[in-house]
Amino acid sequence: MESYEPERLTPVQLAAMRRSLTNGRGALTRRSLLRASGMGALAIGGIATLGACGIPPAGRAEGAAAADDHSAKEKVVNFSNWTEYMDVSEDEKSRPTLEAFTKRTGIRVKYTEDINDNVEFFGKIKPQLAAGQDTGRDLICVTDWLAARIIRLGWAQKLDASNLPHAFANVSAQFRSPDWDPGRAYSYPWTGIPTVIAYNKKATGGRKVDSVTQLLDDPKLKGRVSFLSEMRDSVGMTLLDQGKDPGKFTDADFDGAIGRLQKAVDKKQIRRFTGNDYTADLSKGDIAACVAWAGDIIQLQADNPDIEYAIPVAGYITSSDSLLVPAQARHKTNAEKLIDYYYEPPVAAQLAAYINYVCPVDGVREELARIDESMASNTLILPDKEMAAKSRSFRSLSTEEETAYEEKFAKLIGA
């Protein structure tokens, strides 16, 4: 387990976070991503909280010690989530799945959309977690790299499998056992976020683009290719194209992927590295093909019939947002019941129909088809077996690795 020692982020790490927050995936609200609209940058003070000094060390126990659970007497669960990451009624006055949970269980959900980005949110809760205090939240939803860090620091409570029968049975194979939480002892995924290849078939002259090799080498695409400014996505996709596993790569493998991308930069094959702002260029055809986030592509296809996507034979990168119960949370059992509720296929389908991200719950296809047949057949929402088998996750990084890798990537993209 990683013990907590206050640390200052290096200039390279801070620069990487700024890229993410200003125009990368971290800059987007979950449903707003489908409209390709950014949220703007986090104030520098918010970023700095990750590296602030003066916070007491966390305990070194294996996970957070079980807090006193008040679930039996206090029928409430405090849930912090991203904006527009929960289904709402047509009149936008209620949240149907949450209301149905309360009606069934008697547990009231205090639902708060107070996560705008991982860095800012971690800055809010870190002092309380480090001091062994209750954050006031029983359930939080954070992206995989932050979930991994919270678990390593011992700031998440181990889940009781007896309260999670649906979650245990229905979590999809591709999300079942990440390297940072084997067997899902501390977390369960809320959604998956795939990175794929997208292209404008009008701009490619009707040709399909379905590999990173094409992006990097096809002379007909020269100067009309973009990659993402998120290191894990662009390097991860390149590693896969080189036959390397992003979940097990070495320093030499990483350097090989950076070198491969550098060659494409040097010969001006790659036009630029972007955040979500690639969408306008792709739609217009100024960018013919690119590495893209699947959520963008769902919306672009609705507006432009020339937009296509492809899953490389070599595979693709999937990250996730996951649910955790923080240390010292007062209502752990209630939180577990809420997690399990969202792993019931009818409920999971209702949520997926609203947020349009990869649903991590098996058995929802028939339920989702009752709501919207086109969504049920969209593999960017419900991957079929062939697509799911190609999904790979970028492995967890140590602090030292992250510093070294981000420095090399920043040099590559000129950040």
Image: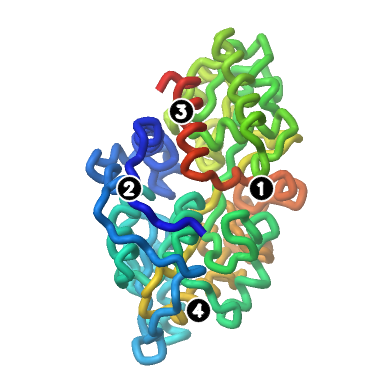
Numbered disc 2: secondary structure:
helix
Q: Earlier in the sequence, mark 2 or mark 1?
A: 2
CB-based contact (under 8 Å), mark 3 and mark 2 = no
Q: Is residue 63 left or right of residue 394?
A: left
Relative to 301, residue 203 above or below: above
The amino acid type of the residue labelled 1 equals Thr
Q: Can you identify the residue that label 3 sits on? A: 407
Q: Can you identify the residue that label 1 sits on? A: 379
For the residues carrying marks 2 and 1, which lies nearer the camera in this image?
2
Q: Residue 102: horizontal and vertical position, in percent?
A: 41, 81
Q: Can you identify the residue that label 2 sits on? A: 50
The amino acid type of the residue labelled 4 equals Lys
The residue carrying pointer 2 sits among few (fewer than 14), some (14 to 19) or many (20 or more) residues within 10 Å by Cα, namely many
The residue shown at (40%, 63%) is 88
Q: Residue 113: horizontal and vertical position, in percent?
A: 33, 59
Numbered disc 3: secondary structure:
helix
The residue shown at (60%, 51%) is 381
Q: Earlier in the sequence, mark 3 or mark 1?
A: 1
The amino acid type of the residue labelled 3 equals Glu
Relative to 243, residue 398 above or below: below
Kindly report the distance in space between the C-alpha atoms of the residues bearing marks 3 and 4. Answer: 42 Å
